[in-house]
Structure formats: structure tokens, C-alpha cells
Amino acid sequence: MSVDRTRTYTWSDPRLLASAASELDGAEFLKKIGSGDLPAPPVAETTGLTMAEIGDGYARFELTPAEWHYNPIGSVHGGVLSTLADTALGCAVHSKLPAGTGYTSLDLTIKFTRQATLDSGTLTCEGRVVASGRRTATAEGRITDSSGRVIAHAVTTCLLLG
């Protein structure tokens, strides 16, 4: 019996997204990705993240754990969970930005409270903006499993660009 697994995926040219991001306000841009009018970014295709909801200062993303998310000790890698949190919190910030304004994460602090595995079901991260100023914005969120148990909680500060 073979223990090897294979995974193949495709992604769209990220320059298409960058162009649209400069022309649309954050909420409109993100909603177009969610509706399929714009392609998902390459990181979403790579990790399997899906956008579930976008609101004013709010973003909810989901991830269904797979074997290829695992670390060597049999649970979802912390970097994958951090990517889920960074995406949801960053998109919560992005949802409040006007056209032509970008952002980048200055920091991300994440605290893991329990492991996630295939048995965890779909993981959900809800990100909410806490404060937004002229140069920075902060957001916080939680990753929960399909039973509502907290897997991790996180905070971020984003630098606003433009």
C-alpha cells in the first residue's frame, strides 16, 4: 500500500486582483472575490481557505482541515492556523478601506488553545476591526471548530497604505 499522496491545484494571475484592488473599495473588492466575479487569491487556492462572509469591519473565513495541513505530530500546522487568522483579520480591516488604500500586517499575535485535526470539522475564523485610524488599524478574532470550541484567538495591527 502506498503512503504517498498527490495534490494538484491551479490559481489565477495575482496581477488581476492587484489591479481590481486599486479601483474598488475594500468591501466591494472582497465581495467580488466571494461571489466569484474575481478569482480567489493564490494563497486561498494553496491553503484551501474560503471566504464565507464580509461585512463592515467584519470577515469570516473557513478552512476544512486536510492531511496536507498537518504537521509532523498529527495536527493542523500552526502556520496554517495563523494564515487563517491573518486572512480573516486582515480582510476585516480591508473591508473598511476606500479604493486605492491597501494594507499590510505589521504584527500578528496568535494564542493556540487546542489542536485542530481532521475530526475538528470546518474551522471558522471571524475577524472584527477593533480600531481604525489614519495610518493603522487593529483587529481581533477567534478560530473555532465545528463544535464551537476555540482553537485559537488572535490580534493584528495593520499598516494602512495609500
Image (cartoon, rainbow, N blue to C red):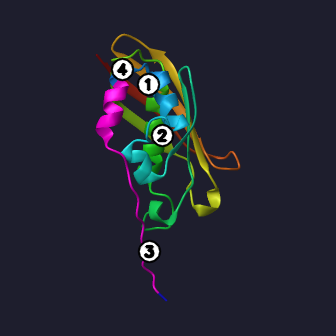
Q: Are marks 3 and 4 in contact (CB under 8 Å)?
A: no
Which residue matches tag 3?
5
Q: Secondary structure at mark 4?
A: helix
Q: Give the magenta-colored segment's residue range.
A: 2-21
Between the C-alphas of marks 4 and 2, the distance is 26 Å
Say which amino acid is labelled 4: Glu
Inspect this view and state whether residue 67 appears: yes
Between the C-alphas of marks 1 and 3, the distance is 36 Å
Question: Who is closer to the viewer here, 124 or 44?
Answer: 44
Q: Are marks 4 and 2 in contact (CB under 8 Å)?
A: no
Task: Characterize the local packing of mark 2: few (<14), some (14-19) or many (20 or more) Cα atoms within 10 angstroms.
Answer: many
Which residue matches tag 2?
85
Nearest to the eye among marks 1 and 4: give it. Answer: 4
Mark 3 or mark 2: which comes first in sequence? 3
Question: Who is closer to the viewer here, 16 or 129?
Answer: 16
Say which amino acid is labelled 3: Arg
Nearest to the eye among marks 2 and 1: give it. Answer: 1
Residue 24, image x and y in percent? 41, 20
Which residue matches tag 4?
23
Mark 2 or mark 1: which comes first in sequence? 2
Say which residue appears at 54% left-offset and 33% top-offset. Answer: 141
Mark 3 or mark 4: which comes first in sequence? 3
Query: Where residue 94 is drawn, which disc sits there?
Result: 1
Q: Is residue 135 left or right of residue 111?
A: left
Q: Quadrant of residue 38?
A: top left
Say which amino acid is labelled 2: Ala
